[in-house]
Image (cartoon, grey):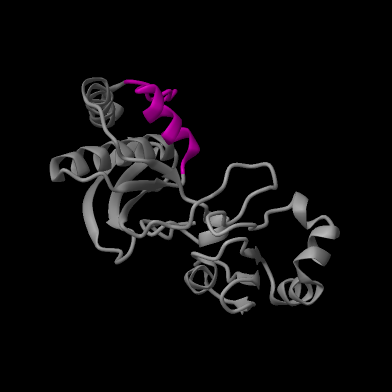
Amino acid sequence: MAKQKYYVVWEGKSPGIYTSWPACQQQVNGVNGAKYKAFESKSEAEKAYTAGWKGYWGQGGAQKSAGSSSKRTYGTADAAPIEPVDYNSISVDVGTRGNPGPMEYKGVDTKTGEVLFSVGPIPNGTNNIGEFLAIVHALAYLQEKGSNKTIYSDSVNAMKWVRQKKAATTLKKDASTRQVWDLVERAEEWLRTHTYQNKIVKWQTKLWGEIKADYGRK
């Protein structure tokens, strides 16, 4: 279960402290120069809200994650902006029991949680392989639908493998891993022979909670 977060809106439609990202987002979307930030505890949020954004940033908050515009949600002062969640998207995740071990993955509608595709369990897969396969499956699924929807994944490694069109895994190839390797090789071939316009975006778990496709096995 995702840990409760508290969202301070210093400058927005209605400044205050909110207990969910969607509620916070409603207050800052479309507001030029909105100031807001997520906190791990209510006391931290109340202290920061009372100090005001100038007072908080003056205490080092500018070097921590802080929102500073209608498009930026959270990130350091010099980091690239993190866009708000695009709910018209697909979120993917993997579920494993052991690493390697039985592995499954799925893609869901980010807004509703509806399962759009699900594969597995497959013997002797890994977390990274499952995340990689889930992203490629989502790309192929969306291409069949003629859709340019965004894909969310919480795996940096899998996103890198997709960009490189190669799963840089050390999983051995033998009879026990034949099924998962067949899927990996098919995914790599798809990436080599297809192009796509879909954005593949890192799901910001610390800000937004667990990805919508999460299996809840942590």
The correct choice, above or below, for 136 with respect to 72 in the image is above
Q: Nearer the viewer, residue 122 or 84?
A: 84
Identify the residue shown where x is 58% and y is 77%.
Answer: 18
Residue 163 among magenta residues: yes
In the rendered view, does 127 fall on the left or right side of 194?
right
Residue 93 among magenta residues: no
Identify the residue shown where x is 30% and y is 46%.
Answer: 104
In the rendered view, does 119 fall on the left or right side of 87?
left
Q: Position of residue 63 (x, y in %)?
A: 76, 49
Q: Nearer the viewer, residue 165 or 54?
A: 54
Numbered marks: total:
0
Q: Nearer the viewer, residue 190 or 49?
A: 49
In the image, the segment drawn in magenta is: 155-173
In the rendered view, does 191 fall on the left or right side of 70?
left
Q: Position of residue 213 (x, y in %)?
A: 36, 56
The correct choice, above or below, for 57 with respect to 8 in the image is above
Furthest residue toward right: 59
The correct choice, above or below, for 94 with respect to 206 in the image is above
Q: Position of residue 46 (x, y in %)?
A: 74, 77
Which quadrant of the structure image shows residue 124? Answer: top left
Q: Position of residue 216 (x, y in %)?
A: 42, 60
In the rendered view, does 147 fall on the left or right side of 81?
left
Q: Nearer the viewer, residue 57 or 186?
A: 57
